[in-house]
Structure formats: C-alpha cells, structure tokens
Amino acid sequence: MRSHPFPALAPAPLLLLLLMLSLVLAATVLSSCTPSQPGVRRKGEADATVGRTLFLKNCAHCHGADARGDEGPDLHGLDWTDEQITARIRNGKKGQMTAFADKLSAEQIHRIEDYLRTLK
Ligand code: HEC
C-alpha cells in the first residue's frame, strides 16, 4: 500500500532555479560581448561606426559630414595622440570649438576617436 514510492520532487521551484541559472548564464555571455574596456584600444569597425554616428551628431556641422573640414579643420590623418584628441574634445577651444566634457561620456569620446583613426 505505497501510494508514493518516490516522493515527488517539487517541480516548480526546480524549474524556476533552472530558469534563473540560464538567465544568469545568458547575461554573463552577453555582457562579455559588449565593449566595456575603454582602456583597450581596438579599431573595431563597430566602434568606428558608433563613433561616426556620434561625429555626425556633434561635430559634423563644424568639421563637415565627411570630416574634410568646414568651419573647423579637416580631421583626416591627424597626427595628434589619443590624449591630445580626448583633451580637445573634452575642453574644446575658446571661441572656436565647443567643449564636450558635459555632453559626451569618456566611452563616447573613445568611439569618436576610433572613427577619427579610420580617416587616413
Ligand atoms: C562649433 C564648431 C565646432 C564643433 C561643434 C567641433 N569642432 Fe573641432 N574644431 C573646431 C575649430 C574651429 C577647430 C580649430 C581650432 C584651432 O585652431 O585650434 C577645431 C579643432 C579640432 C581638432 C584639432 C584638429 C587640428 O588639426 O587642429 C580636433 C581633433 C577636433 N576639432 C575634433 C572635434 C570633434 C571630435 C568634435 C565633435 C565631438 C568637434 N571637433 C566639434 C570647431 C568645432
């Protein structure tokens, strides 16, 4: 007269646990794909594309949509270091170029630099 030879494992909490585990796993995999290392300089095409979009939005009205120069100079073949370019974008130049320190994040400025580096 054994009605339950094996005590049923409660399936709901187990499934929930599995679901949570797979979500955590998915989140880990996804986050390792996003560029979250601003110190690591890679000229990834995707980064440059993001940078180009930011450039068109913030810089093109002075430097031209193709960065060939307009009110501001041509930005092709810049021989500035990354630090110099970052400083210029952050601080601008009085009376000539907007300062972007409050408008763009460090990450966004890096992406714009990635784009500028593609301009030979
Ligand atoms: C209001 C117009 C304006 C905007 C907006 C602007 N710039 Fe400029 N930029 C200038 C001018 C003018 C100069 C030249 C200043 C000088 O003589 O040093 C310049 C110089 C520069 C230089 C130095 C290049 C060189 O050879 O002297 C860089 C790099 C640069 N800009 C990048 C950017 C980026 C990136 C953005 C967008 C985030 C941007 N600028 C937005 C007007 C602008």
Image (cartoon, rainbow, N blue to C red):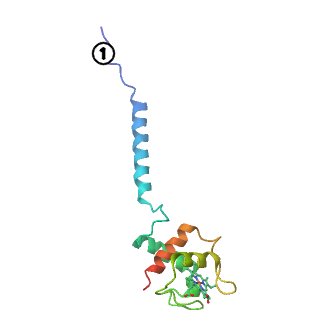
Q: Give the left or right position of residue 7, taking residue 50 as reference.
A: left
* The C terminus, quarter of image: bottom left
* The N terminus, quarter of image: top left
Ligand 1 shown in quarter: bottom right
Question: Between 22 and 90, which is closer to the camera in this rendering?
Answer: 90
Q: Give the left or right position of residue 65, taking residue 120 as reference.
A: right
Q: Residue at x 49, y 74 (%)?
A: 51
Q: Is residue 30 above or below residue 118?
A: above
Q: Is mark 1 within 8 Å of ligand 1?
A: no
The kind of residue tagged 1 is Pro
Q: Is residue 82 above or below residue 34?
A: below
Residue situated furthest right in the rendering = 95
Per the image, label 1 sits on a secondary structure element best described as: loop
**How far across and how far down the image is residue 79, in percent?**
49, 85
Query: Badge 1 is on which residue?
Result: 5
Q: Residue at x 66, y 87 (%)?
A: 96
Q: Residue at x 32, y 13 (%)?
A: 3
In the rendered image, which quarter is residue 17 located in? top left
In the rendered image, which quarter is residue 23 located in? top left
**How far across and how far down the image is residue 65, in percent?**
51, 86
Q: Is residue 71 above or below residue 26?
A: below
Residue situated furthest top in the rendering = 1
Question: Between 50 and 43, which is closer to the camera in this rendering?
Answer: 43
**How far across and how far down the image is residue 41, in percent?**
45, 69
Q: Mark 1: give few (<14), some (14-19) or many (20+) Cα within 10 Å.
A: few
Count the marks: 1
